[in-house]
Image (spheres, rainbow, N blue to C red):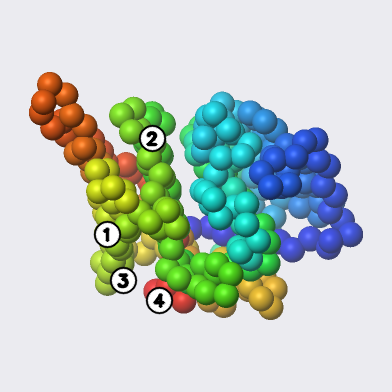
Amino acid sequence: MHTAHAFPDPDSVTIDMDSEGYVGVPSNFTWRSEEVGELHIGGNEGHFDFTLPGIAAVATFHDRVPWCEKRPEMGGPEGWLGSTPLLPCHYFVHSLASRTTYRLRLRNKPSSSSSSPPSPPPSSHLSGQGYAHMESNYGNHFPSGWLWCNAISPQREVKLLMVGGKFEIGPTAPTTWIVAFRSPRFEWTFRTTDLDKVTARLDYSTRTLRLEARSRCGRRRIEVMMVAPPGSFGPPLYVPTRGGFSCLPGCRESFTATAHIKAVDEGGRGGGRRIVLEEVCEVPLAALELGGALQRL
């Protein structure tokens, strides 16, 4: 996996806001830095053009899939907690799967096997199309430990997002979970802060996460098994901490996991009989992120 980090001088950064979005955070803005490039997020489209150490990346995205179609700028993963002062770090999902076109130029490392003077390393060019999950955190710092999972099916009909960890809520830091599942049959969100029940187990030896979420009424449930291949996790990434950005321990990500999903609604009734609706799917190229104290790799 190729990763790159850049920390531009704050004096080189400008942010132009065109409108205000969720809890005062712009969902229509342009971020620019003379040192690395720019990022533009519009209501339904956007682009970025970055030049970082060892990599240059250009992408455009459109056809946004918001968290909530009826309230695209206000609905989000936090639920009722978003309107309180209890969260030190807020969480907004701009799109669950925007259509994306990208171009990458990777600068390869020079070979050290030759005794001749090093020549400029060759570049590798990649381009293609896919989907972009677009979200933002804003506030003070990340939690002490967390898991983040994302999966988008090849035709974009299935979207899965799971986030869990020791998130600070006022003076406490309970283990909380948010699970969002969107499919042709279901449009579900589970939150432990809404008294939905989530149980999860991560097996580090097999890089396997098993999770079950059940609605407060017990009618809806989703079972997920996510497995990441050996050696697929990249080096630690920088994250915001109380002492500033740090990669110790930071977080590590795999983008080649497979998500096995089973969703069941067993509470419907028709003609005097109970109706059970079920959906089963497998999504390749899913993302599994282990952060902070939960990294342990």
Label 1 SS: strand
- Sequence order check, earlier mark of 1 and 3: 3
Q: Going 27% across and 59% down the picture, which residue do you hit?
A: 210
Q: Going 11% across and 26% down the picture, which residue do you hit?
A: 272
Asked if the residue at tag 4 contacts the one at tag 2, i.e. Cβ–Cβ closer than 8 Å, the answer is no
- Amino acid on which disc 4 is placed: Arg
Which quadrant is home to the C terminus? bottom left
Asked if the residue at tag 4 contacts the one at tag 3, i.e. Cβ–Cβ closer than 8 Å, the answer is yes
Residue 217 visible to the viewer: yes
Q: Residues within 10 Å of mark 2 (few under 14, many from 20)?
A: few
- Sequence order check, earlier mark of 4 and 1: 1
Asked if the residue at tag 3 contacts the one at tag 2, i.e. Cβ–Cβ closer than 8 Å, the answer is no
Query: In the image, is 157 to the left or to the right of 33?
Result: left
**Above or below for 174 versus 286:** below
Mark 1 to mark 2: distance in Å?
21 Å
**Residue 281, image x, y percentages:** 25, 38
Q: Nearer the viewer, mark 4 or mark 1?
A: 1
- Sequence order check, earlier mark of 2 and 3: 2
Mark 2 to mark 4: distance in Å?
33 Å
Mark 3 to mark 4: distance in Å?
8 Å
Q: Which mark is residue 204?
A: 3
Q: Which residue is mark 2?
A: 187
Q: Nearer the viewer, residue 123 or 262?
A: 262
Q: Nearer the viewer, residue 78 or 142?
A: 78
Q: Going 60% across and 63% down the picture, which residue do you hit?
A: 87
Q: Which mark is residue 210?
A: 1
